[in-house]
Image: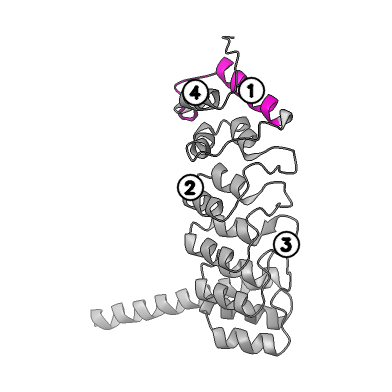
Amino acid sequence: MKIVYVICLIVFALIIAYTFKSFSSDTLVSKYYDKPNYKLLLKYIIKENLDGIDQLVKSGVDVNRKGKGMTPLIYAIQSNKIESFKFLLKIGADINAIVDNDLSVIIEVIKSNNIEFLKICIENGADVNLLHPLGERPIFFALENMKYSAVDLLLKHSADVNLSDSFNNTVFTCTLNARNFTGCLYLLNKDLSPDKSDKRVVVSIIHYIETAYKVRDMEQPAYKDFFELIEKFKKLGFKFVLKEL
C-alpha cells in the first residue's frame, strides 16, 4: 500500500512539474512575441526542433523578426541552444542585429560563458568591433567582466584595442577609469599598447594612473596589479608624477 502511495505521489509531482514547465514556457514566449507562429518558433528553438524551425521559416516566419527585446537568435543564446543557434544562422539570421538599442548578438554571446557561441559568431561574420548602442565594444565588455577566453578570441580575430567607444574611451582608458588594472595589464602583457599619437588617450591614461595612486588602497583586490601596470606603462614611454594625497 505504501509503495502505491509513493508511486502516486511521484506521478503527481511529475504532472505538476510538467504543467508548471509548460506554463512557464508559454508565459515566457508570450513576453516576447504576440503572434502564434513566433511563439511556436521560440518553442522549437528550445526543443532544438530544426525541422520545425525550417518549416516555419519556409511558411513565411521572419528569422530576424524583432520582438519585445528579443530575436530568435538571441533567444537561442539565452537558452543555451547551440544547435538552434547554428541553424538560425544557416537560414539567414543576422549576426550583427541590434535589438531595442541595448541588445546585440555578440554581447549576449560573451555573457553566455559558452565560448563555442563566440567561435560560431566569428565564423559567421560577426563584427568583433561592433559598437553597441549603449556605447561599448565587445572587447570592452569582455574585459570588464573578466571573460579572458573571449578577449583572446576577439583579439585573435582583429579586435582593435585603439577604437573608441561612444564616450571617446579606448579599452585602455576605460579599464583604468574602472580601476580594472588587471584587465589593462592583461592587454599590455600581450604586447598591445595604446596609440600614443592620440594625445587625448595619453592624457587620460596619465590622469587615471596618477589619480589612482593618490587614493590607492593596497588592501583592495583591484590594486594587486597596479604597480606592475605602472612599470609596463613606463616602458612604453609614459611619465607619471606620483604624489601622495
Name which of mark 2 and mark 4 comes first in the sequence: 2
State which region is magenta: 201-222
Amino acid found under the numbered disc labelled 4: Glu
Mark sitting earlier along the chain (2/3): 3
Q: Is residue 224 above or below residue 89?
A: above
Q: Nearer the viewer, residue 7 or 119?
A: 119
**2 vs 4, front mark:** 4
Q: Which residue is mark 3?
A: 99
Question: Circle 1 sits on which residue?
Answer: 206
Q: Nearer the viewer, mark 4 or mark 3?
A: 4
Q: Choose between 208 and 129: the one closer to the eye.
A: 129
In the rendered structure, find residue 231 and report the number of the disc placed on it: 4
Under mark 2, the amino acid is Tyr
Across and down, in percent, residue 111 comes to: 55, 55
Verify CB contact (< 8 Å) between mark 2 and mark 3.
Answer: no
Chain-order first, disc 4 or disc 3: 3
Work out how far the residue at label 4 is from the one at label 3, CA to CA, in angstroms: 42 Å
Crowding at mark 4 (Cα within 10 Å: few <14, some 14-19, many 20+): few
126 horizontally vs 133: left or right: left
